[in-house]
Image (cartoon, rainbow, N blue to C red):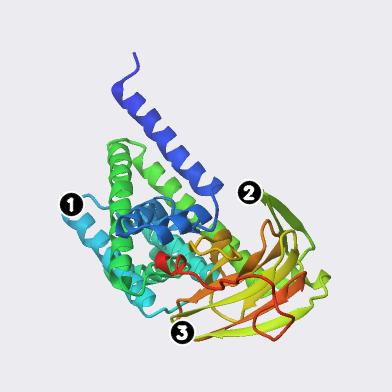
């Protein structure tokens, strides 16, 4: 008759297998934010920040792998609390400080370093410093604090992709960080159950070696993927292909063009946005007019809302075509009403950014003198500012 221990071993085998499968099969860019998440945090309050922080940690496989490595050989609550608290303090300090100070880094590069931290903790767990390097390992508590600081930069870099509120900036960051800790505690509880079950098994020594070598393999895989992404982000012109994605939203046809060099632009407009400031740029288009556009910032990502307002409208209504945080965007718009159409940009960084806007189509510029437009124009509205 099969024993309870046998079934327990089988269950933990399956659990660990599913965890490792998820680690390898999900995105290597461990904590990227979807458009839905961005819109949720833009339009929500502090509870949304907290919820996003929790789900962000639970999907941040590099952070979870690091925590898994930290607690692997810890057996007492005191030790677990000490080392996990050290990691929490480390990433909380840089998450709050870097976001509040708008310190930004290339997220592929910082994630590559985080991936190496997973390799480090697993290498330490197998006593690699003594076995393979013939040296004593560094103080683990200090290393965890230091590596936690690096993890905090990664979290901050992703959080700064969003247009954070100026009035409640610190509270938004703290709410996000509280969510991070709640997600970490939830994942930690599951990890401790799995490890505790295995620790009672005669195969724990084998399991520990396999698991930590798997963490080294995972960290190496994530490192290579992040460096591949870094190469693409810093040498994008070497990887550019002419493609287009067509989307139809509420009878508006948006064609996103990845190679803007195929379009001979009619106008190029340069717009500078001061630090922690915003601006709008509008054009007038008749009903059924076509506008091709492409814009790019010279440095930081900016929040943008590409929208239109019907001529003569006095209700404050506007139609948003695209809303996101990025350093560039492009496409084609066929209008469904006459009125002003254009962009709202918000610069959340601590330095000015310059937007270069290229346009072509059936439009009239409102920033230069042209033939009079036979319509009542409304070029600004309060609705976008109400998001912040």
Mark number, residue 86: none
The earlier-in-sequence mark between 2 and 1 is 1
Q: Secondary structure at mark 1?
A: helix
Q: Position of residue 158 (x, y in %)?
A: 46, 66
Mark number, residue 275: 3
| Crowd class of label 3 (few under 14; some 14 to 19; many from 20; radius 10 Å) | some
- In the rendered view, would you say 28 is above or below 3? below
Mark number, residue 250: 2
Which quadrant holds residue 371?
Answer: bottom right
Q: Residue at x 65, y 85 (%)?
A: 270
Tell me how far mark 1 sits from mark 3, CA to CA. Answer: 46 Å
Q: Nearer the viewer, residue 150 or 183?
A: 183
Tell me how far mark 2 sits from mark 3, CA to CA. Answer: 35 Å
Which quadrant holds residue 311?
Answer: bottom right
Q: Which residue is mark 1?
A: 77
Q: Position of residue 302 (x, y in %)?
A: 53, 73
The earlier-in-sequence mark between 2 and 3 is 2
Q: Secondary structure at mark 2?
A: loop
The earlier-in-sequence mark between 1 and 3 is 1
Q: Residue at x 78, y 69 (%)?
A: 361
Quadrant holding the C terminus: bottom left
In-image side of 230 versus 78 (left or right) = right
> Depth-wise, is mark 2 or mark 1 nearer the camera?
2
| Crowd class of label 2 (few under 14; some 14 to 19; many from 20; radius 10 Å) | few
Q: Secondary structure at mark 3?
A: loop
Quadrant holding the N terminus: top left
């Amino acid at each position: 008759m099969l024993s309870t221990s046998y079934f327990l071993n089988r269950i933990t085998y399956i659990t660990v297998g599913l965890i490792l499968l998820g680690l390898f099969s999900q995105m290597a860019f461990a904590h990227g934010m979807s458009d839905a998440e961005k819109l949720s945090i833009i339009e929500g309050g502090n509870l949304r920040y907290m919820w996003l922080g929790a789900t962000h940690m639970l999907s941040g496989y590099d952070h979870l792998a690091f925590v898994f490595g930290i607690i692997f050989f810890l057996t007492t609550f005191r030790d677990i609390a000490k080392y996990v608290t050290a990691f929490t303090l480390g990433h909380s300090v840089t998450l709050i400080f870097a976001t509040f100070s708008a310190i930004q880094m290339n997220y592929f590069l910082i994630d590559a370093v985080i991936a190496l931290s997973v390799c480090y903790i697993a290498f330490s767990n197998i006593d690699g410093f003594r076995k393979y390097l013939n040296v004593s390992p560094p103080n683990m508590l200090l290393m965890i604090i230091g590596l936690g600081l690096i993890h905090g930069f990664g979290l901050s870099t992703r959080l700064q992709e969003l247009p954070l509120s100026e009035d409640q900036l610190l509270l938004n960051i703290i709410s996000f960080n509280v969510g991070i800790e709640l997600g970490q505690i939830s994942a930690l509880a599951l990890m401790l159950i799995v490890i505790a079950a295995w620790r009672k098994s005669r195969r724990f020594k084998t399991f520990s070696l396999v698991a930590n070598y798997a963490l080294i393999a995972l960290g190496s895989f994530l490192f290579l993927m992040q460096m591949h992404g870094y190469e693409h982000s810093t040498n994008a012109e070497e990887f550019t292909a002419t493609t287009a994605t067509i989307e139809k939203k509420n009878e508006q046809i948006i064609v996103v063009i990845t190679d803007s060099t195929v379009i001979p632009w009619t106008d190029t407009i340069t717009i500078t946005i001061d630090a922690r400031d915003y601006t709008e740029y509008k054009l007038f288009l008749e009903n059924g007019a076509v506008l091709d556009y492409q814009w790019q910032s010279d440095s930081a990502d900016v929040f943008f809302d590409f929208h239109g307002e019907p001529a003569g409208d006095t209700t404050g209504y506007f139609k948003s075509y695209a809303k996101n945080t990025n350093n560039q965007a492009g496409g084609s718009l066929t209008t469904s009403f006459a009125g002003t159409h254009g962009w709202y940009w918000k610069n959340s960084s601590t330095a000015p950014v310059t937007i270069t806007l290229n346009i072509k189509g059936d439009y009239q510029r409102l920033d230069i003198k042209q033939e009079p437009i036979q319509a009542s124009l409304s070029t600004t509205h309060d609705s976008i500012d109400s998001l912040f």
